[in-house]
Amino acid sequence: MKLTRCPVCHSQISLDALVADDSGRELLAKVASLPDFVARPMLEYLGLFRPAKSDLSLSRTLRLLTEVTDEFRADHILASALVECVNKLREKRIQYSDTKPLANHNYLKQVYQTTAVRNNVAVKATSVSGEKQETTKPDDSDWYIQQAKRMQAAGQDPLGEQSAIAAKLRELGWKPE
């Protein structure tokens, strides 16, 4: 049963061939298991790996998808990083008439790190060789100090027993002004 051309990779797609092929069946299952808000940008991202003059094979698409889902949790941070990555790379391709397909996930890793920091989410950093390093957490000490100043302005004691941020302020060595 011929469906149509894939909107992502532009290859001819047949449902019969998709489920008959092991990689196609597994790819379909993996994409279906992703939350919708991650699946759509993920498919657009995978399309960036397609060579200009040929189709992206199902086995390579599955391998790329597996690499991303093994590296990152399928959540709003990944969805945002995928959308930003796809938009920036498409802009670059239009601006510089660049048709080279992506070769790896390094740019996505950078965008993911930036997105995580922007959203104040701790993520595991990975080295170039893929070995796990210690967890990095964005420095949020400025936020605690700003909160303490706001509490003081409101007549509250930031270091008092009722304060939810007192322990962190003490850890930072903050003193009331």
Image: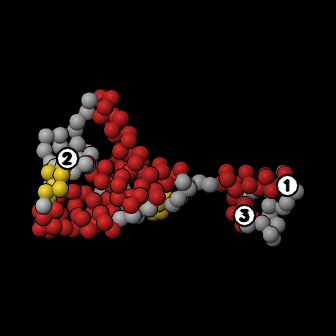
Q: Where does label 2 land, which residue?
A: 10
Q: Nearer the viewer, residue 119 or 24?
A: 24
Q: Earlier in the sequence, mark 3 or mark 1?
A: 1
- For the residues bearing labels 3 and 1, Cβ distance under 8 angstroms: no
Given residues 41 and 112, the one toward you in this image is 41
Amino acid under disc 1: Ala
Residue at horizontal 73 percent and vertical 67 percent from the top: 164
Q: What residue type is labelled 2?
A: His
Label 1 vs label 2, nearer the camera: 2
Checking the image for residue 165, the label placed there is: 3
Picture residue at 67% right of the left edge, 51% below the top = 142
Q: Residue 154 carries which label?
A: 1
Could you tell me residue 4's position as x and y percent?
A: 18, 52
Describe residue 27's horizontal placement relative to residue 75 as left or right.
left
Q: Residue 156 location, x and y as percent?
A: 85, 60
Which is more foreground, mark 3 or mark 1?
A: 1
C-alpha span from label 2 to label 3: 53 Å
Number of other residues with Cα within 10 Å of mark 1, as a class: few under 14, some 14 to 19, many 20 or more: few
Q: In which quarter of the image is residue 22?
A: bottom left
Tell me the amino acid under the disc marked 3. Answer: Ile
Q: In this view, does 67 lie to the left or right of 149?
A: left
Please say if the residues under marks 1 and 2 sit with CB atoms less than 8 Å apart: no
Q: Is the residue 2 above or below the residue 52 in the image?
A: below
Q: Residue at x 30, y 54 (%)?
A: 43
Element type where label 1 sits in the image: loop
| First in sequence: mark 1 vs mark 2 | 2
- Mark yes or no: residue 26 visible: yes
CA distance for labels 1 and 2 = 59 Å
Q: Nearer the viewer, mark 2 or mark 3?
A: 2
